[in-house]
Image (tube, rainbow, N blue to C red):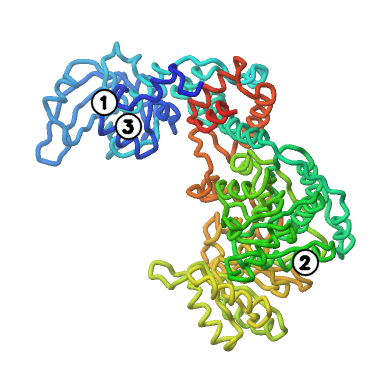
Amino acid sequence: MSQRPESLFPLFAALPTLAGIGPKSAKALEQIGVRTPRDLLMTLPASGVDRHRRASIEEVVPPAVATVEVMIGQHHPPSTKGRPYRIAVRDEAVDFTLIYFHARGDYLQKLLPTGQRRIVSGKVELFDGIAQMTHPDHVVLPDAGDDLPAFEPVYPLTAGVTQKLMFKATRDALSKAPELAEWIDPPLKQREGWPDWHSALTAAHAPQATTDLSHMAVSRVRLAYDELFAHQLTLALARAQVRQKPGRVSAGDGRLRKRVLAALPYRPTGAQTRAIAEIAADLGTPQRMNRLLQGDVGAGKTLVALMALLVAVEAGGQGVMMAPTEILARQHLQGLRPLAEKAGVVLEILTGRDKGRERQAKLAALAAGDIQILVGTHAVFQPDVQFHDLRLAVVDEQHRFGVTQRMELGSKGQAVDVLVMTATPIPRSLSLTQFGEMDLSVLDEKPPGRTPVTTALVSTERLDQVVDRLRTAVAEGRQAYWVCPLVEESEVSDMTAAEERFKRLRSALGEGVVGLVHGQMPPADKDAAMARFAAGETKVLVATTVIEVGVDVPNASIMVIERAESFGLAQLHQLRGRVGRGAAASTCLLLYQGPLSKTGERRLAILRETEDGFVIAEEDLAMRGAGDMIGTAQSGLPRFRIADLERQTALLELARSDARKLLHDDPTLDTPRGKAARVLLWLMEQDRAIRLISVG
C-alpha cells in the first residue's frame, strides 16, 4: 500500500470542503497549522462552557454563563450614538437585561420579538446591582433547546475563526471520519479500557464535563497513544531498516583493551564497564550498530569511546572519532593519545588546518591502514579522505551532526558501525522521541577523582566582592571562567556583555590576566584565546556559552555565571561541568539579578541541590516543556497535537515496546493488525515510514 488508502481521502481534502469554512477562514486556520480536516480533528477543545439549562439566572454566581428560557419584554434602542441597545427579559424568577452594542434594531426585533419566548445563553454580569447579559452567545426557539450542547467545547482559536465556525466544521469533519480497523494490540486495548478510534475522537470533541478535557480522560489517552504509537512505529521501522543492511562482525581479542586498562590509574565505573560491554557485543554481531552513549559531564565517555575504537583495531580495522570543533578534536587527541600509545596503537588527527605535504602524508598512511584511529572534525568527510578498512565511527555531540552526515560517514567504509556520544543528559521521554531508533547506553556514575563542585547563589549587588575573591584566587594560582549571557552591549537588554565585562575585569585584575572568547570571533582567534587559557597564560577567561561543550582545563576551579537566571537548567549544568575536573576544590557562583521569578528561583535552587544531570534534565523538562528544551526548530522533535511528552512518558514507553513487538512479529505489516497500523501511519502523516516498508 504505497499510496494513501481511499478511506482517508475525506480527511486529507481541502479545508473548504467542510461546512462553514471558506477560503478566508481556511487561510486563518493555516496560521495555527491546520491544513486539512484531519488536522482539525486532531485539534481538541482546550476548555469548555457549561450550558446546562437552568430555571433562572439566580442559580449562578455572576460573572458566569447561564442558559435560561425567557419571556421577551420591551426593546430600548439607544438614545444617542455609541450607547447600547437594551432588551428587557424575564426568566422564571427575575428580570434582567440583554445588551447589544452596534446592533441593527430590525435584526434584533426579528431575533427577539417582544411577547415571545426564547432560550438565551451567555455570560451574566452585575452592573450597578442589576443583572445583564451582553451579546448572548446563543438565542434559540424553546423547542430547539436540545440543539444547544449542555457542555460546549471551546477550541484554541486564531484571528478570523470563531467558536461557532470551529464547532460546525469539526462536527462536519467527524461525520466524514471513517470507521477504521483497530491497530492497537487487543489485550492492551482491553486492559486500558480504551474506546475505538472513531468513538474516542467523537467523545474528545463532545466533552460532557471539565474532567473530559484532562489529558487523563480515556478518549484523549487513546488518541495520544495513537500519535505516540505511530511515531514509535516509524522509529522502529527506521531501526529495522538500519539493521537489515548487512553489517560486519568486528570481534576483538581484548589484547589492546587489556593494555589500556592496566595503564589506567583508576578502575572504570560500573556504568563504563557496562557500556563498553554493550558496545563490544553490538560490534560482534552482523547487524549494524546504531547506539547513543549518553553520559553526564565528566562521566568518562572518552574512555568508553576509546575502548570501542580498540575493538575495531583488534579486529583488524580502523576507527574514526569525530568532534564538532577543532578545539574539541585536539582535546580528544590529548586525552586519547597517551592511552593509545600504551596499547601500541597509531592515533592521528585530521582537521581543516592540515595542508599540503603533511596532509598528503596523513592521507596516504590512512589509506594504507598505518593510522589505526583517526580523530577529526568534519574535514574527515572530504572525498579524498580514504580509509583502508573503516569499521567504527564515533560521533561526539549529536546535535552538531545531522543524519545525512552520519550516513556520509557510513559510506566511507563497508557497513560502518556508528556510536553517537552526547554529554547532555536527555530525559527518557525525549531520548525515546528523538533517538528512538537508536539503542541507548547510559553512564550514570562519576569516575573516582572528580571533586564535587560547591554551588552558591550571589546577587549581582555583590559583584565587587566577587571580583575581590577572584583577585585573591588568581594570586593563589587558580583559574576561573566568567560566563556572560550576550555579546554586545545592547539597549534592549541590561545584561552585561562579554566585551564590557572583559574590559572591566582587565582593569580590575591587570593586563594579560584576562582572556575573551565569544561566538562572533574568527575561529582562529577563539582557538588561540582558549589555548592561552588552557596553557595557564591567562587566568580568567570571559566567555559566552561557546565554552559549554568542550575545553577541559583541570586547573580551572571557579565558574562565575552572570545573570544565571536567564539560562536554561541544562545549560547551567553543562557550564558548571567545566570546573571540578582537577584536584582543587571547585566553586560555581550563580550571579543573579533580583527579584527572581518563581521559576527562576526554582531553577537555581535545583542546581544548588544536585549535580546529577539526569535529575536536572527531568526537572528542566517539567519546567520548560519539550519543544522549548531542545529548541524545537533545530531538534527535529515531532510536534504532537494531542500527546503530552512531559506528562505521558509511561504511555510513550508503552507505545515503544508495542511498536517493536509488532514489527518483531510482523516485520512487513501484512497481518490484519499490521495493515491497520499502515493506515495509522498514513493518518499520522508518517509517509517516510511507509516508504521504508515498501522498500523493505
Earlier in the chain: of badge 3 and badge 2, it is 3
Give the Cα separation between the discs numbered 1 and 2: 76 Å
Q: Which residue is mark 1?
A: 95
- Whether residue 527 is situated above or below residue 278 in the rendered picture: below
Helix, strand or loop status at disc 1: strand
Closest to the observer, 146 or 20:
20
CA gap, disc 1 and disc 3: 12 Å
Q: Is residue 498 visible?
A: yes
Where is residue 76 shown, x and y percent of the image? 14, 30
Q: Write down the residue under mark 3.
A: 124
Q: In this rendering, is residue 422 above or below 120?
A: below
- Identify the residue at the far left of this view: 80
Q: Amino acid at mark 1?
A: Asp
User: If you read the primary sequence from the N terminus, does the residue marked by circle 1 or circle 3 appear first?
Assistant: 1
At 14% from the left and 22% from the top, the residue drawn is 109
Name the foreground residue: 249 vs 73. 249
Picture quarter containing residue 460? bottom right
Q: Position of residue 5 (x, y in %)?
A: 46, 19
The amino acid sitting under disc 2 is: Thr
Q: CA distance from mark 3 to mark 2?
A: 64 Å
User: Tag on residue 451?
Assistant: 2
